[in-house]
Amino acid sequence: MSKKQVTAGYWANVWQRFRSRSAGRLALRSLGVFVLIAFLAPFIANERPLYAKLEGHTYFPLLQGMLVDMGWRTWDAKLLPAEDWLDKSYDKVWYTFIPYSPASIDHRNLNARGPFERQRVESWRFRHWLGTDKTGRDVAAGMLHGTRMALWVGLVAIGVALFFGLSLGGLAGYFGDQGLVIHKSTLAIWALCLPLGLYYVVYLPGMSYEPSWISQVLAILAYLSAPLILAMLLSRVFKRILPKSGQITLPLDTLLMRLLEIVDAIPATILVLALIATMEQPDTTYMMVVVGVVSSASVARFVRAEFLRVRKQTYMEAGRALGFGHFRLIFRHALPNAVGPLLVLLSFSMAGAILTESSLSLLGIGAADRVTWGSILGGLRGQHEIEWWLAFFPGMAIFFTVLTFKYLGEGLSEALGEK
């Protein structure tokens, strides 16, 4: 039996054990519902019609608007975006189920109209079924699009945390204090380029004003990869030119642990607030990156512990005896055996990232043009009366999302722990 067949059989057993638990199945189905809502949110709640006939011409404003937002197309001259799409005089029109976008302002229903209160609408078709906030924005549209933002924030933050955590924790756990022999020139190059890359990925995204989130993500990857690629190229050049007598043993594990102790000494929320305070106009993408960088400390510590365990296994010693390189040992042997427990940590970290973003939005920190569950909760600030719908609906959404990832992590932990 090949190694691939053994690995496939192991993960098949893990999946079967995970599905055998009712809590795991419920968490997986709930996650599927959240993903489906996040994907379909623009097609369920949008002020732009699905179909419109205007002056004898047929348009699809919703799809065209998506292409415009991504920078792939411009608006037609006869269908320039209006302040209120509902006021246009169409020959024929099909609206979405909720004819409001999360940022749409209904001037006839300002000052937080409740779901059961009298609303000034033309018909039941335009009623705000979950009420409005104090600025007249539809709560139902904000809830649907907030699901999209919550999952997106969690994924980006976990992706950033996984990148830094795997890189630092994996190297520290694999090499320890005696395993990494490096030339002084290479150490100097990486000491200059790594802070430069960290500066780019943390600071510059908050200063950029890209037209779409795709451009923002590509910009972050470019900011991070350019200094690292430069460091690798310069290291190869200097390694061939300079003599080998300048090599030193780098205590990588000790350095990482001291760095993690410094990070742990500062509360995560305070550290996030301090980094965000350096920006004049922090956007949601920047907030995701900052949360991910701060969360990478726990991922790095966990990965380090897993690599310390894995590197002592007999198959790792056999690989070193056969002359396998560090790259092959890390990515083909050590990392695959550390992925299982890491998935459990990422499930809980996803819930933590969503909670952190909601807390920051509740405090009014973040992009004002993005509606999230936390920003809907933040609408209660400064109110003389408690509008229960502004607290109940986003609060329950945050609760069930965090609970879903909690049960998902517990289910994975139990499934991976059984032999």
Image (cartoon, helix red, strand yellow):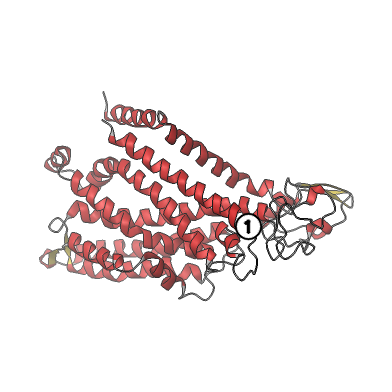
- The part of the image, by quadrant, that contains residue 172 is bottom left
Q: Tell me residue 141's x, y (percent).
A: 67, 53
- Of residues 246 and 92, the one nearer the viewer is 92
Residue 1 visible to an observer of this rendering: yes
Residue occupying the far top of the picture: 1
| Residue at the front extreme, as displayed | 385
Instruction: Relative to 204, say whether 162 is above or below.
Output: above
What count of labels does the image hold?
1
Q: Residue at x 80, y 60 (%)?
A: 77
Q: What is the three-letter code of the residue carrying label 1?
A: Trp
Rendering quarter of residue 117: bottom right
Residue designated by label 1: 388
Q: Is residue 288 above or below residue 188?
A: above
Q: Is residue 393 left or right of residue 10?
A: right
Q: Position of residue 106 (x, y in %)?
A: 76, 61
Judged from the image, the secondary structure of the residue bearing numbered disc 1 is helix
Q: Around disc 1, counting alpha carbons within 10 Å, would you say few (fewer than 14), some (14 to 19), or many (20 or more)? A: few
Residue 317 pos. (x, y %): 13, 41
Q: Quadrant of the N terminus?
A: top left
Who's the residue at 38% across and 31% down the image? Answer: 15
Residue 415: percent from left, percent from top: 34, 34
Given residues 297 and 127, the one toward you in this image is 127
Q: Is residue 219 visible?
A: no
Q: Residue at x 60, y 67 (%)?
A: 368
**Quarter of the image that includes the C terminus:** top left
| Residue drawn at the location 63% of the way across and 57% of the way down | 388
